[in-house]
Amino acid sequence: MDGVWLAALSGLIAGGALLAGAAVAWVVDIPKAVVAAIMAVGAGVLISTLAFELVEEAAQDGGLVPTSVGFLAGAIIYTVADWLVSRPRHPRPVQPGPNIVARRATAPVVGGAGGMAIALGALIDGIPESIVMGLSVLQVGGLSIPIVAAVAISNIPEGLASTAELKRSGEGFGRIALLWSSIAAITVVASVVGFLAFESAPVGLIAVITTIAAGGLLAMVCNTMIPEAFDEQQILTGLWATIGFLAAFVLHELAG
């Protein structure tokens, strides 16, 4: 039963980071460059954690083949899901003509669409992240500080960026709070499910499940976090990501 509570605590910390980022963005107008820097650091932390806390331990416990299969499968699953969510919905082509500029200028813009897209991404990313945290409780026999810290750091800029966009679009506090509270609750449930569903599973299966989530997280970092950070930070993105990677690596070494 202690493991269930630790898995729930992992999800609560990760979900709380989303809520914390959203709360800060609602109260303070955070510059986009600062959000991008935090996101780049979070990307580096996640990459380090994937390498040293998830994939390496999965290979040691379950073997190289299950780890490789799971890791590649996770990347493919996330990439396909990301494409299905973000692909164009067959927009009606704009016919060329003398009034094309006027038509484009008067086309309606959906306010807060970017903020909702980030929130949807946080939900899609949060489920495998939470499952990983639940599995990590099984693997280490307790709360995995490096994994929880990595996920929490990566969640803060998502809450910041999405809430900032929604706030600028005129979205009310109640709906934003409900949105992030719901996502945070889902992370807690997913962490507990990740622990309970695989509590008695063989080590090979746990290795596959862990690396499926790990591969999906790496694909998410490359598809989402790094490009969004680079849009604002440009040449400094690599430096921030390196700092995040190094911080997580040092934490891993100290914890080990």
Image (spheres, rainbow, N blue to C red):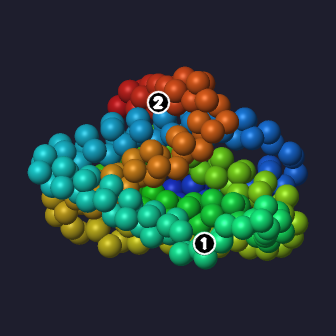
Q: Nearer the viewer, mark 2 or mark 1?
A: 1
Secondary structure, mark 1, is: loop
Residue indicated by mark 1: 93
What residue sits 29% from the left and 68% below the top?
A: 198
User: How much space separates mark 2 and mark 1, taking CA atoms?
Assistant: 44 Å
Mark 2 vs 1: CB contact within 8 A:
no
Secondary structure, mark 2, is: helix
- Amino acid tagged 2: Phe
Mark 2 vs mark 1: which is more N-terminal? 1
Quarter-wise, where is residue 53 in the image? top left
What residue sits 45% from the left and 45% below the top?
A: 222
Q: Is residue 172 left or right of residue 98?
A: right
- Amino acid tagged 1: Pro
Q: Would you say residue 1 is visible in this rendering? A: no
Q: Is residue 8 left or right of residue 106?
A: left
What residue sits 72% from the left and 35% below the top?
A: 33
Nearer to the camera, 182 or 164:
164
Q: How many marks?
A: 2
Label placed on residue 245? 2
Question: In the image, residue 100 lies at what x, y percent?
Answer: 75, 65
